[in-house]
Amino acid sequence: MKKEWQQQEDGVYKVRTCGWSPPGDHPVGCGMHLHIKDGKLVKVEGDPEHPITEGRLCIRCLSLPEYVNHPSRIIHPMKRAGKKGEDKWQRISWDEAWDIIVDKINYYKENYGAESIVVFGGTGREACLYYYPLGFAAIGTPNVCYPQSGWSCYGPRCAITDYILGAGYPEIDYAGYFPDRYDHEGWHLPEYILLWGKEPLKSNPDGFFGHSIIDMMKRGSKLIMVDPRMNWLATRATYHLQLRPGSDTALALGMLNVIINEDLYDHDFVENWCYGFEELSERVQEYPTDKVADITWVKEELIKEAARAYAKAGNSTMGWGLAIDQNPNGVQLGHALLSIVAITGNLDVPGGVTIGPPASLVGKWRVETRAELSEELWDKRIGAKEWPALSTALATTHPDETLDTLETGKPYKLRMGWFNSTNFITPTCSAAPDRWYRALKNLEFCVVQDVFMTPTAMAFADIFLPLSSFAEHDGIVITHYGRNSVFLGAMNKAIQVGECKSDVEMMIELGKRTNPKAWPFNSVEEFFDFQLKPELGFGFAELKEKGLYQPDYEYEKFKKGKLRADGEPGFNTVTGLVELCSTLFESWGEDPLPYFKEPPYSPYSTPDLYKEFPLVLTTGARNYASFHSEHKHVASLREIAPDPIMEIHPDTAKKLGISEGDWVVIENPFGKAKERAHVTPAIDPRVVHAEHGWWYPEKPADEPSLYGVWESNINTLIPHKHIGKLGFGAPFKSILCKVYKAEDQNFYK
Amino acid sequence: MSRNGLMIDYEYCTGCHSCEVACKNELKLPVGKWGIKLAEIGPWQVVDDHYEWNYIPVPTELCNMCEERVANGNPPSCVLHCLAKCIEFGPLEELAKKMEAKGKKVMMYLP
């Protein structure tokens, strides 16, 4: 990449940057040039020099000027001027905002202890790197909460990987580590790409550039898709296993049965690098393919063929998606999938599955800031003792326990809330958002930092802090948040909008007022120098000139002693091997081997309920036009995705008198939501899929409407605390419902 | 001199809409107007488990194949930004040869 990251041309100031969010995505770091004219962002153009995206951009970046310049953005700090839930606000200065906030923090700490303050963080935005230190080192509370039931996003997969492989996140090897990409000597094209509960084209999960799949398909990779929906990608797959939602673990065990019983596994890898193969072999005998076919609704022959194809191929890879997390049986599913990859010899090899080294590339600081808290305070972290498998891997509260605490005031009352880039009464991450909504009313004082007024901010904020978009601040973007990162990119500030500030700027400003010894940084550059220099040997100014940094990848680290702190060969687990049978799961009272458990509500686990609610509902597949609840304001994106969509099979639609485009109500005993029917054979007649993330900025702001947040709130159908035995996973992807044409409905809570 | 055209490999067009929005940016088109617009064919069953489902971007009367960009040595906006890299721009004869080499699911436009 060129050294110059800013240039002036025909009255236009152009700034190179790697994007993150807000708005728009996980840390994919797509390369672009921001075009600024008269102090305003006028255009975004892809950067052909970027080694991963090569100029390509999705519509969320291409429409960035509309988002950044939107008239309804909040660009000054505000305090509430009316009752909570009333759209009355007063503009204040940053100094006044900080004075009010610091007084409140001190008041709650002195009178009720720091644990009476809770920091909520959202999904995927840059704030993921910063809401932990905001809580631990600036505010001083042990209660940092990601409010998704069962922590059902990324955390479970990271925890499973920690316990089974002792490594950083396993990712598809798409040659992202290498500047010469697919031409890199020593890299192999994966013969098969197994995509399980994952549609990466639209989701770019955790920084994996989804269209790399297309790059590799063009070069000859074949696909095995495991998905209850036939999405577009599945029509290009060699095998599509269209399983019943929530039956995944049975399918994975059935595939293991084929691979083991037909002797298709890598004997060398199993003998030298795996623990518990005998036990696993015994367990999979309980999952013969005919039985698995009955459980999963996938044809027996197809299960066998896909398992054989994957195991017999040369190097093959696997990408596991959110469906592993959003499943109370998901720990066992993740365990089974890692077992498939391991025993077929596809771990840490070219064109297989890459794994992160023990040390994170930047970003350790965010978790280490918990050293700012006393042991006594750390012990008060909500749900940590009850759920050791979760609290060992993740430095947060247990999300479901946090709702219980808000509702009951036990073990202590939560009084102040800080919402950092999270809008979770909309159907984004929380289960039972209506319960959260009622419980959050118990908080006495709340701060929200966000870009736009959201339903969550309208309901709860006493102070609203205006957040800058990635075009408006300096920062870094790092795929997989530092664990198994193909690159680290520089994010360059191109403009200032109003008085908006970034997460880092706000965190430092607050920290200097509340706990200055932990916040010695005098500028954002100094902060990033502190993050980068010890790990990489260069600072932020140099990163800007590099554009991005790719750390390179070393294969077969387990043979070279590069996965363990003691330098011995093997994996960083209790046994030093890949734990096909988990010593840690057993110590926490869980079965050490993967097993299948029916979803809590399903045709088979609740047959009586199924009579009244005769469809399996799966939720949350993404579209290109939004990132969860973001982008609903942007006219050119709403033109592409104007309404929430529920997919239903033509036979089922006909039976229910539903036609294409009809507004329908999706309902179960927990809640209901209104979406528009899309009649398509892409879904099984027994299943419907409904989109998440919907609210309507164009609808009234004041309660009870809150921008129509309860009208299409699909997460109200997902019950609270139906989680797995280790505390992970919730049934967002598999619940029961009925569907009928919408008449006038009252959705207010 | 040969005329230029656009070639679309719709085996790989993922329906991402980037061409539509990139084009709107270039031509400064409002909501409701497009210089290129995505068409969707399917999904419907061809036979057994095999389905037809294709996205195909279609240039409209407003498409000028990014004269200005091309004159400055840059690719058309849809070509640069396409996530699947399935749009190519160039002389018709060259594109025709590429179509033949690809062998299936390709089309060529002269807007």
Image (cartoon, coloured by chain):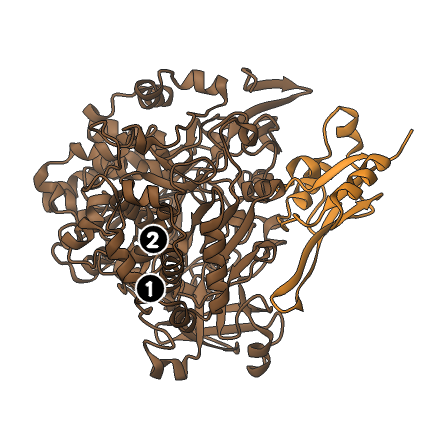
Residue A405 appears in the rendering: yes
Q: Chain B is drawn in which colour?
A: orange
- Crowding around mark 1 (Cα neighbors within 10 Å: few <14, some 14 to 19, many 20+) is many
Residue A450, horizontal then vertical, whole percent: 40, 43
Q: Name the residue under label 1.
A: A432
Answer above or below: position of A315 versus A150: above
Q: Identify the disc placed on residue A334.
A: 2
Where's the N terminus of chain A, which quadrant? Answer: top right
Give the quarter of the image for residue A524: top left
Who is closer to the viewer here, B28 or A198? A198
Residue A658, horizontal then vertical, whole percent: 58, 77
**Label 2 sits on what residue type?**
Gly
Chain name for mark 2: A
Answer above or below: position of A443 versus A682: above
Answer above or below: position of B55 versus A491: below
Judge left or right: residue A57 versus residue B89: left
Q: Residue furthest left?
A: A376
Cα distance between the residues tagged 2 and 1: 25 Å
Q: What element carries label 1?
A: loop
Residue A656, horizontal then vertical, whole percent: 55, 81
What residue is rendered at 14% in x and 36% in y? A373
Q: Among the chains, which one is brown?
A: A
Residue A198 appears in the rendering: no
Whichever of labels 2 and 1 marks the residue nearer the N terminus, that label is: 2
Give the quarter of the image for residue A270: top left
Where's the C terminus of chain A, which quadrant? Answer: bottom left
Judge left or right: residue A453 versus residue A483: right
Q: Identify the disc placed on residue A194.
A: none
**Label 1 sits on what residue type?**
Ala
